[in-house]
Image: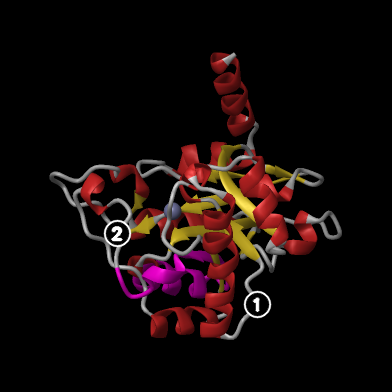
Amino acid sequence: MRIPVLCYHNISRAPYFNVKRRSLHTTPLNFYLQMKLLHILGYKGLSVSDAWDYLMGKKFGKVVVLTFDDGYYDNFKNALPILKKFNFSATLFVVSDLIGSYNKWYYKEANMIKPLMNEDEIKIWIDSGMEIGSHTRTHPILTNLKEKELEDEIINSKEILERKFKVEIKHFCYPYGKYNDLVVSVVKKANYLSAWTLDRGRFKVGDDILRGKRINIPKDANIIRFYIKLFTSYEEKRALSIVQTIL
Ligand SMILES: [Zn+2]
């Protein structure tokens, strides 16, 4: 039994010119069609916490986990109404020191300033039955950091979010999907229940949940490709072919 854990970034149309990393954008229409397909097929989109019993193998059913990285304002504006329409929930991984700010860690590289949700918007997100998790304080490449710096990014971001929003922060997501054994050990020390990578594949009960695999939904994924990525062994095969190339 494999559970697709989807990774989204922006839910908006990418600007036409001069913007890099356009693949991080899913249009609101495509997102709507993807959620509608899940609904038609009898699947429920759930946050990591709402899906927890399924991930732990205590419950079985048609579920897909929905995650959003970085905490963009367009998730609030465009994804939240669609999630509510289908009665789905989702986990938003927030950069704790950049709430109400913008994508400071890569706006130059992307050639685009993307606003992040502010405190009030995140409160509405939570009050709508959605979840937030931590995506560090500043979105660094964690594998470049020393242990003390890792603790600041990983442990303190949890505390900052818990204090600000009065909810327990149970889940973590690695910026750029980058981690190593030291990074994972700090995540464990911070008492996160799960941590999510960009390693390809669907989650299998018993997998290491501090190195959770996800399915990235690229910008131009049409509905057939979306179906194949979620409900066939396509992603596992792709992951395998990447490993073989490296070897
Ligand atoms: Zn990120």
Residue at the right extreme, as displayed: 58
Asked if the residue at label 2 sits under 8 Å from ligand 1, the reply is: no
Front-lying residue, 24 or 109? 109
Q: Quadrant of the C terminus?
A: top right
Total residue callouts: 2
The residue sitting at 45% across, 78% down in the picture is: 122
- Tag 1 and tag 2, C-beta contact below 8 Å: no
- Look at the image and give the residue range highlighted in magenta: 76-101
The residue sitting at 66% across, 68% down in the picture is: 170
Q: In this rendering, would 181 be left or right of 86? A: right
How many residues crowd mark 2 within 10 Å: few (<14), some (14–19), many (20+)? some
Q: Whole-percent x and y of residue 139?
A: 43, 56
Three-letter code, disc 2: Lys
Residue 107 lies in the magenta stretch: no
Q: Whole-percent x and y of residue 204?
A: 75, 43
How far apart are labels 1 and 2 at the CA level?
A: 26 Å
Q: In this rendering, would 237 be left or right of 33? A: right
For mark 1, what is the residue? 168
Q: Whole-percent x and y of residue 202?
A: 65, 41
The residue sitting at 61% across, 40% down in the picture is: 180
Q: In this rendering, is residue 222 above or below 84? A: above
Q: In this rendering, is residue 216 above or below 36? A: above
Quarter-of-image position of residue 118: bottom left
Q: Which of marks 1 and 2 is nearer the N terminus?
A: 2
Q: In this rendering, would 21 be left or right of 52? A: left
Residue 107 visible in the shown view: yes
For mark 2, what is the residue? 104
Q: What element carries label 2?
A: loop
Quarter-of-image position of residue 105: bottom left
Residue 216 visible in the shown view: no
Q: Whole-percent x and y of residue 74?
A: 33, 66
How many residues crowd mark 1 within 10 Å: few (<14), some (14–19), many (20+)? some
